[in-house]
Amino acid sequence: MSNTIKSRPQIGSRIFSELKRLLQIFLYMLVCVGAVLYFRMSIPSKENIGLWHFGYAIVKALLLAKFILLGHMLHIGERAHGRPLFYSSVYQALALALLLIALIGLEEGAVALVHGQSIRESIDQVLGNYLHLVIAQGLLLFLLLLPYVAFLQLSDALGPGNLKRLFFARRHN
């Protein structure tokens, strides 16, 4: 019985730390997705981009953050962890980008099923009509994930709290 009492604070602490990590990833992805959306809005086109697209950006950032957190829980791309920081960062960012592409594809398939399409029709639609968008989205995801992964790995290499101290502590000259 004492084991369950001791494990409750650990579970609460773990949930809190995972929610904090999800919020941090969400804010980073929201800035990235929002910047891409803002850039897209600055280019004149026939397609009208309204304020409701910012709601889409919030939902997309939350979904990407959830998928990235899942990738961290599954230790995606951590195989090259002992290599130089540059190579391990590129490897992990690429692995996470591929995971995100696969999960976004599954999400699109689920949306197609909800809208009454068959799985075959949704796969044909994604591969036929949107393959160039999937490639462009994958490249964009990789470029957005690279700084995020590099900072995570730099923080791990420096030790707990040292990167935060380097960025936010007062320097003495």
Image (tube, rainbow, N blue to C red):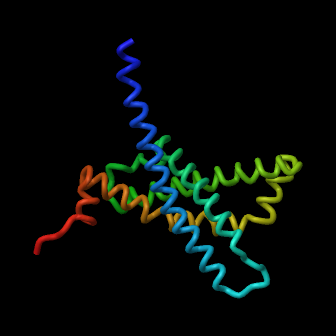
Q: Is residue 173 left or right of residue 16?
A: left
* Total count of labels: 0
Nearer the observer, 121 or 5: 5
Seen as rendered, the residue at the extreme bottom is: 44
Instruction: Work out which residue is located at the far left of the displayed protein and give it.
Output: 173
Give residue 61's quadrant in the image.
bottom right
Q: Position of residue 121 (x, y in %)?
A: 86, 52
Q: Is residue 122 left or right of residue 99?
A: right
Q: Position of residue 80 (x, y in %)?
A: 39, 50
Query: 102 above or below 48?
Result: above
Name the quadrant of the C terminus: bottom left
> Which residue appears at 41% of the width and 26% of the height?
8
Residue displayed at 19% across by 68% down: 170
Toward the viewer: 146 or 91?
146
In the rendered image, residue 37, in percent from the top left (x then y), is placed at 62, 74
Residue situated in front as seen by the camera: 2 or 130: 2
Seen from the viewer's position, the closer of residues 139 and 151 is: 151
Is 171 on the left or on the right of 78, as rendered?
left
Q: In the image, 164: left or right of 79?
A: left
Q: Quadrant of the N terminus?
A: top left
**Relative to 32, residue 100 above or below:** above
Residue at 45% x, 54% y: name it: 92
Q: Position of residue 25 (x, y in %)?
A: 48, 56
